[in-house]
Image (cartoon, rainbow, N blue to C red):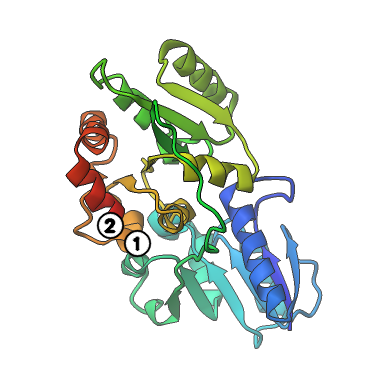
Amino acid sequence: MKIALITPVPAQSRQGNRITAQRWAHLLRALGHQVRVAQRYDGKPYDLMVALHARRSFAAIERFHHRYPERPLIVALTGTDLYGDIRTSQEAQQSLEFASALILLQPKGVEELPLHIRPKARVIYQSVPNPTRTWPKAKTTFDVCVLGHLRDVKDPFRAALATRQLPATSRIRILHVGKALSDEMATRASAEMAENPRYHWLGERSHGRALRVLARSHLLVLSSLSEGGANAISEALALRVPIVASRIPGSIGLLGEAYPGYFPVQDTAALAHLLHRAETDDTFYAALAAW
């Protein structure tokens, strides 16, 4: 088939939606399909459209639907869609109606959809290739990876703030991989690094280099306010890196209600407690790793 894969993020970006689009295009091409990844629909008669983001890709969704209403149109819902836009944006709501099917990355997202839309939903857990090698962990530090661009929805400095509450004997250091998406975020990251010796902002890295930082780490912290289903969780699981995460539906849908590594959203003290426990309590760390 000829497939249009629409993402609102430009080609040069390493933001999540662009990485997802590239990954999906690779999988579809391996199955023998022709795939064009683009920000906008070019009007051509594709057999199928896959659009990431109900609101931000609405123009492409609407145009394809009206031009080829009988052809399949699949909309992949992000965390911004599920936990914001589909309640407030008419464009996002209309995308749900136009879609032949909806992709969700974890099952709890289905609960956010209107009842009449739910039969369209299909949950596809994001896969990660098996690692071809193992990476050694640091021996003198307990490295905690934060993997994500610096923007408000990621609550990007929560792990850094938590380390300020750790005892002086702690060996924890934060390795934060991600691009600052505003000058304000860049300034704050630089200031935090200057004031907090445990915090190391590594900036934007290629996907491969970011995964190497994660693989070498003892722990991943995902402190987001909302997620559609973070690929960082799948990557950490594949690399056998234990996870500490804010207790949000997007992470519960992937890790389960009973996962022992949750902390309340924006609760710095609770995160500090979990970090200290993961570093010092071998039984607790083993329980995270075994999950």
Rendered residue at 54%/22% (across/down): 184
Residue 290: image tag: 2
Of pointers 2 and 1, the one earlier in the residue sequence: 1
Q: Secondary structure at mark 2?
A: helix
Q: Secondary structure at mark 1?
A: helix
Residue 254: image tag: 1
The image shows residue 38 at horizontal and vertical percentages of 74, 60
> Quarter holding the N terminus?
bottom right
Which amino acid type is marked by label 1?
Answer: Leu
Q: Nearest the camera: 224 or 75?
A: 224
Which amino acid type is marked by label 2?
Answer: Ala
Residue at the extreme top: 195
Q: Nearest the camera: 195 or 64?
A: 195
Total marks placed: 2
The image shows residue 254 at horizontal and vertical percentages of 35, 61
Instruction: Reply above or below: 229 against 187.
Output: below
Residue 240: image tag: none
Instruction: Reply above or below: 44 against 59.
Output: below
Gap in angstroms between the C-alphas marked 2 and 1: 15 Å
Answer left or right for 44 relative to 291: right
Instruction: Reply above or below: 291 against 243.
Output: below
The image shows residue 149 at horizontal and vertical percentages of 53, 38
Rendered residue at 71%/49% (across/down): 10
> Quarter holding the C terminus?
bottom left
Q: Quadrant of residue 61?
A: bottom right
Can residue 148 be seen in the rendering of this structure? no
- Check whether the beta carbons of the residues at disc 2 and disc 1 lie within 8 A of each other: no
Q: Residues within 10 Å of mark 2 (few under 14, many from 20)?
A: few
Q: Residues within 10 Å of mark 1 (few under 14, many from 20)?
A: some
Can residue 151 be seen in the rendering of this structure? yes
**Which mark is in front, 2 or 1?**
2
Answer left or right for 4 relative to 204: right
